[in-house]
Amino acid sequence: MSIESASLEQHKDKLGYLLKVASVVLIMTAAVWAIFFVAIKDPLGVLTETVLVVLGCMAYAQTKRNNTKIIAFIYLPILFVVMCFICVCFDVPNSAAPRSNNHYFLPMALYAYVLYQDENPYLRITVPVVMSLAFLLFACTNFGFNLSSMNDDQRLIRGWITNSVALVMLYLAALIMQSDFKMRHSLELDLSKALLKDEIKLYYQPQVEDGGRTIGAEALTRWRHPILGNISPGVFIPLAEKSDLILHLGRHALTMSCHQLAIWGQTQATAHLTLSVNISVKQFQSADFVQHIVDLIKETRIDARKLQLEITESIFAHDLEDIMIKMAQLKAHGIRLSLDDFGTGYSSLSYVKNLPIDELKIDKAFIKDVLTSANAATITKMIIALAHELNISIIAEGVETSEQRQFLIDNGCHNFQGYLYSTPLPITEFNTFVFFKDKA
């Protein structure tokens, strides 16, 4: 069983269950109060609770479709605004009945933390903090304009119901967070052990020119857990990036890559191959990054021009002066630099123009839609034209169909990587691929 079915899917199932329960509770609670407001002839209360019922129904529908981002970025902010409105207009405290609806902000803050867990750290921290501050503001002040027709006895009953529901939702959210923390901590510990036990392997996805000849490969890390089986890089790479494990993982990948280049260099059939290795932002920022690579090149006696480091555009959001210095040092030793996922992040034309980039890599998101989206086609053509203008190599990743390949050829891109040619392969299968592909 893979980690997706054992851990990641477990997390998604729990989160989905939590959101469904929250949606149902919201629908039922709001519906009951809507009926109550109809009975006491309070049209504003009926309207507000109806909005919550609709919001709960829409959230439930999106949860069934696993559209958690829509819930996080649309429905949760709307719910926050509505709850603020209720606290101000329907739940103004007095000596007989304290405010209670503000307690909903506590489980909402935990829900937000879980929903934004894999988003920008700014969002992951800011949104729960804002909701917590809203709880504090309404708990410590009497601010509001009471527009409700409810008397104090009715408000006291509502307070008991509201606090009970908020407590249950807070408890459920805490359970999910505790489960997530335990799962991630366990996986992080296993990942650190995997590096020591040599469970991390490199797979190689061929890079092919339009004539069919294999010109190189991209090295991709794969982890086979002794119990959970194959673990997707989409799971363990983000986990490693949140700690210093990414530095050890990156060093491991670079070491294996240089040794593989040394082996290829001993055989005429593979001596021409280049090898691209992905470099994380943390790796690039480490003080000994350049010296470590230089030492590896000397140790393995490889041709530095065969080693290509792939950096993403996110690197430009950091210390640009330090980046330029390190890139110049790497280039001085003959190492090639490729800008991965070009067109999707922080880079601008000035970066490409002024930095010593050897290759642009067209992101697979553009290639996927290049035949169906005019925007994707236009952007792809512009990237190819830019590369030619600056005399930079160009390669397209995610090429899956012969039609996509022909589009790229027609527009001046002649190097490809994708499932049209091969999935990432273990080294024995990659060598076989190179031998038979180039012999064909």
Image (cartoon, grey):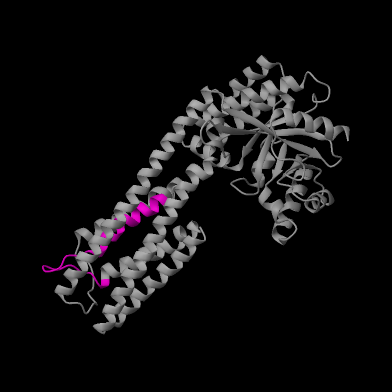
Using the image, determine if residue 435 lies above or below residue 313: above
Q: Which sits in the foreground, 376 or 239?
A: 239
Count of marks overlaid on the render: 0
Residue 110 on image: x %, y %: 35, 52
Q: Is 94 colored magenta in this rendering?
A: yes
Is 18 situated left or right of 230 in this image? left
The residue at 47%/30% (across/down) is: 190
Q: Quadrant of residue 210?
A: top right
**Up-down relation of residue 155 to residue 383 (above or below):** below
Where is residue 164 shown, x and y percent of the image?
24, 61
| Residue 121 on image: x %, y % | 44, 45
Span shown in magenta: 89-114
The residue drawn where x is 19% and y is 71% is: 155
Q: Is residue 9 left or right of residue 260?
A: left
In depth, the one of 232 and 151 nearer the eye is 232
Name the quadrant of the N terminus.
top right
224 left or right of 209?
A: left
Residue drawn where x is 46% and y is 63% of the image:
74
Depth check: 320 or 186 in front?
A: 186
Q: Indicate whether 148 appears above or below 308.
A: below
Residue 226 in sight here:
yes
Can residue 286 be seen at all in this image of the molecule? Answer: no
Q: Position of residue 228 (x, y in %)?
A: 52, 36
- Residue 275: image quadrant is top right
**Residue 282 part of the magenta-drawn span:** no
